[in-house]
Image (tube, grey):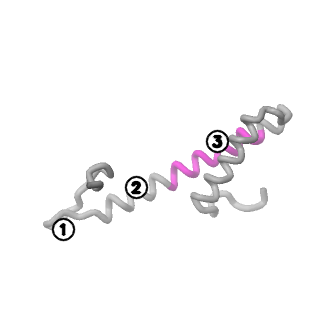
Amino acid sequence: MSENKENRSFEEMLARLEEIVRALEKGDAALEESLTLYTEGAELIRLCTGKLTQAEQTVVRLQKGADGAPVELAFAEEEG
């Protein structure tokens, strides 16, 4: 792929990861192709995890308590 994976959106990377999983689950790819897909998938997982971590940190920074001090709330507590 000529496109820089790091510039792709989370959703694009997740969609590609799902394609890779489907291809590997089919089991009809040659060994070399399977290894290439596995390597690409591992890299996409690393990048997606990084984007999720960044998003979580942004959400935590944006949450503030009544006194203006940051308050970290679990997502389950927000449902209600």
Residue name at image x 23 percent, y 61 percent: 70
Magenta stretch bounds: 36-51
* Residue 24: percent from left, percent from top: 74, 37
Question: Which residue does the numbered mark 2 point to in the structure image?
Answer: 56
Instruction: Assign a secondary structure to mark 2.
Output: helix
Q: State the residue in front, 63 or 2.
A: 63
**3 and 2 marks in contact (CB < 8 Å):** no
Residue name at image x 86 percent, y 34 percent: 30
Q: Amino acid at mark 3?
A: Ala
11 w.r.t. 22: above or below: below
Q: Quadrant of the N terminus?
A: bottom right
40 w.r.t. 72: above or below: above
Q: Measure how far apart labels 3 and 2 are at the Cα level.
A: 21 Å
Question: Which residue does the numbered mark 3 point to in the structure image?
Answer: 42
Farthest residue in the left direction? Answer: 67
Residue 72 part of the magenta-drawn span: no
